[in-house]
Image (tube, rainbow, N blue to C red):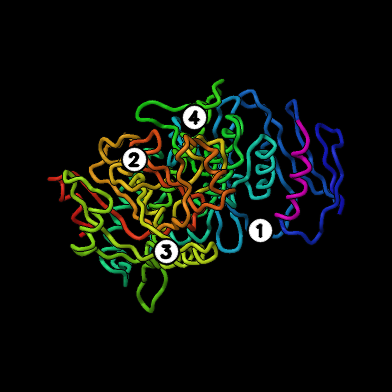
Amino acid sequence: MRVKISYNGCLLAEILAREDADESSFWKPIAEEICRHEFTEPGEICIETEDHRTATIKVEEEDGRIGLKPGKCHIWFSPSLYGVKKLRKVDLETGSHVFYDIVPNNMGPRTIDVGARFGQTGAKNAGADIVSGAFVLKRPYQTWFYWFKYYTLLAAGYDDLTDEMYDEDEEIAELQKMFGDPNDMPLSDEDDLVLRANDFFVKRARQSVSETMNVDWLSNKLPFNRRMVNSAWKAWNKFKDVHTAETANDVIAKLIKVTDVSFEDGKSKKKLSDFLVPEVDDPEEQKKLIEKRIDEWETFIRSMEGVLPAQTEKNGEKIKVVSPFGNISMKAADEKETERIRKKFRIQPEYSFKYIQVDAPDFRERFDAYIKAKGIEVTDEFIHGSSTANWKSIIMNGLLLNPDAPIHGKAFGHGIYTARDFYKSLGYTDFNGSKWAHGEQDVGVIGVYRAAYGKPFIPKNGEFGEKCKSIVEKGGYNCLDYKSQYGRFMMDEIIFYQEPALCLEGLIVFCNKGDEEAIKWAA
């Protein structure tokens, strides 16, 4: 059937519509067509079918802007089931960061009406009619107006991030959890140390997420899901294409959209510019500023990942927890192995530590395949320090090399940096007083890695900086071993440029002498 669309009496368009359509498929192309047009003054849009049924849309000015609102509708089709839409808009020029969630009220196979949540991303909005820090519609939309609202928002510069942020299965699981039997606690076949380690790492990740997102942990519902975390990693990996502050800020804008990072900072409020990379004239300083943002976002995303709930599966009448670390297992090291670790990495006597041996079969298989393919016969153990909030994600996913770009200002190019000395790696943890991370935590964590040492490049003639990576890759070397006696650093650094070159073997969990209560869980 033919459908005429007019605005203030002037014909805008005439399109063909299916007569056998349901409500959604009838209105979608009409809404898309109308929202292609720009309306500059108030008035009325009329939609008329060839059998003279009509619907009207009001074009109204509100807060200095022209917008569309539903009028009367006399065009009816069979009901449709509409889905949630998550739309985000970040404007780097104006500093605007807003969201609009279209939330249908569904009953069985049909949508009854359409509600919405909207406001600033990452902030609690002041005003009336607020639910969970967002404005809500006073009156829901009629279902036929669903696509008009959607395309109006796209025309206003919003991006549809539904596929990157919304996981219907997780929403259903949350409802089932909410209304399930509270006494039906999940079971696990995992050894007790794995669960204690998981609890510890999740607690620290929750602290990190709380600082960044202002999460109210009294609520059972996280403000993000697994799909949003995966989308954040996908966006973060685009830092590999970054060469300027401008391109870095484009990536950051996408990360702000998909993570809902908080703009609240205690009693004050952050601006969008607080998240961005400022432009400076000094190229080296620009690299450092970009590197800082990349590291901050990596820690944030790893923390988000660390607090995601463990997957569960039905097992007869019970719910079984799938290991929080996948197929990775752990055991406390005996005294002999603990002493070996102390001596090998020169752990100073003022620190108490527990050594947890880690069996990561997938990473070990990847490592074995790598050294076989490269013909590497010499392996060794080295250590790597990182924020405690990162470790659950690191254990599950390994140390990440992306983004792999020379812009990021690492001393020897972008690689995975390891050490021989405990004190060197301590500086990169968030342990109290750490040299480079300026940590304030009572417990630090350092990973012990089996490494494909093979044939190392050892600079002895003043070679330094990012060119060393090129020397390793073009010279047939397997890593870069920057020994302190030949260079400007006080302690050795061993850098690997391939992720499979390292396999996690253990975790050194340490504290100051006298604070052993903080690490007793690792025994």
Q: Quadrant of residue 249?
A: top right
Task: Report the Cα–Cα distance between label 2 and label 1.
Answer: 66 Å
Q: Earlier in the sequence, mark 3 or mark 1?
A: 1
- Compared with residue 466, is residue 516 higher up or lower down, i.e. above or below? below
Q: Is residue 356 left or right of residue 418?
A: left
Reading the image, the residue beneath label 3 is: 311
Which residue is painted at 60% across and 63% down in the image? Answer: 109
Which residue is painted at 45% across and 63% down in the image? Answer: 377
* Furthest residue in direction left, as rendered: 514
Give me the disc on residue 80: 1
**Residue contact between numbered discs 4 and 3, judged by CB atoms under 8 Å:** no
Task: Report the Cα–Cα distance between label 3 and label 1.
Answer: 32 Å
The residue range painted magenta reads: 24-38
Task: Report the Cα–Cα distance between label 4 and label 3.
Answer: 37 Å
Count residues near mark 1 (Cα–Cα under 10 Å), then give few for <14, some for 14-19, many for 20+: some
Dot 2 amino acid type:
Met
Q: Earlier in the sequence, mark 2 or mark 4?
A: 4
Count residues near mark 3 (Cα–Cα under 10 Å), then give few for <14, some for 14-19, many for 20+: few
- Compared with residue 52, is residue 316 higher up or lower down, i.e. above or below? below
The label nearer to you, 4 versus 3, is 4
Q: Quadrant of residue 64?
A: top right
Residue 501, horizontal then vertical, whole percent: 47, 57
Of residues 400 and 62, the one nearer the viewer is: 400
**Residue contact between numbered discs 2 and 3, judged by CB atoms under 8 Å:** no
Reading the image, the residue beneath label 2 is: 491
The label nearer to you, 4 versus 1, is 4
Reading the image, the residue beneath label 4 is: 289
For mark 4, give the secondary structure.
helix
Which residue is painted at 32% across and 42% down in the image? Answer: 424
Q: Is residue 194 left or right of residue 470?
A: left
